[in-house]
Amino acid sequence: MSANEEWAVISFNNRDPVYLQVVRHFKERIATGLLLPNQTIPSRRELGALLKINPNTVQKAYKEMEEQQLIVTEPNSHSRITSDAELLSRIRMELASEAVQVFVTAVRKINIGVDELVELVRREYAEGGERHD
């Protein structure tokens, strides 16, 4: 898969604004190590073309990421991922926390005890989340 194809791997939903989905996509790529500190990112026009979205939408996403200090844009230079290690760590924890909240909300309906749930999670995590049908 080429670098350009890697950027195009995103499925937009109809619930959330596209620019926020782009921001989340960046956060996920940062959390998984696909985007590294100080890595140059595509220009607004390039990313718009790769994702097949309006460059103005990408501009809005980049502005949001600049406000969150996820990316740094210096005059006459490409934007790049922040090198702030603390911020990058917080991104990982933010995404993990969101996933846990969704999980807990779903599992609470089943009325399973915390100890039993933790053991189940520990076992599934150790097994790599493979299906056992």
Image: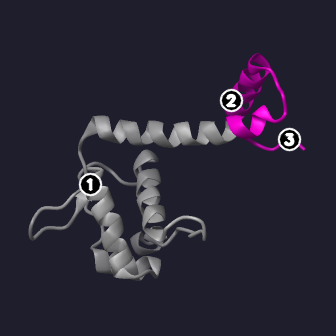
Question: Looking at the rendered structure, which numbered label has been put on residue 132?
Answer: 3
User: Which of the 4 image quarters holds residue 107?
Assistant: top right
What's the magenta bit mostly, secondary-structure-wise?
helix
Q: Which residues are magenta?
A: 104-133
Q: Where is residue 51? Give x, y as percent.
A: 45, 76
Q: Of the residues under marks 1 and 2, which one precedes in the sequence?
A: 1
Q: Where is residue 92? Give x, y as percent.
A: 44, 40
Residue that mark 2 sits on: 126
Q: Quadrant of the C terminus?
A: top right
Look at the numbered disc 2 and give the secondary structure of its residue: helix
Instruction: Sort mark 3 into few (<14), some (14-19) or many (20+) by Cα contacts within 10 Å.
Output: few
Residue type at the position of mark 3: His
Instruction: Sort mark 2 into few (<14), some (14-19) or many (20+) by Cα contacts within 10 Å.
Output: few
Residue type at the position of mark 1: Glu
Spatial CA span between label 1 and label 3: 44 Å
Q: Is 125 positioned to the left or the right of 72 in the image?
A: right
Instruction: Check whether the beta carbons of the residues at disc 1 and disc 3 lie within 8 A of each other.
Output: no
Compared with 109, 7 (above or below) is below
Q: Of the residues under marks 1 and 3, which one precedes in the sequence?
A: 1
Compared with 37, 62 (above or below) is below
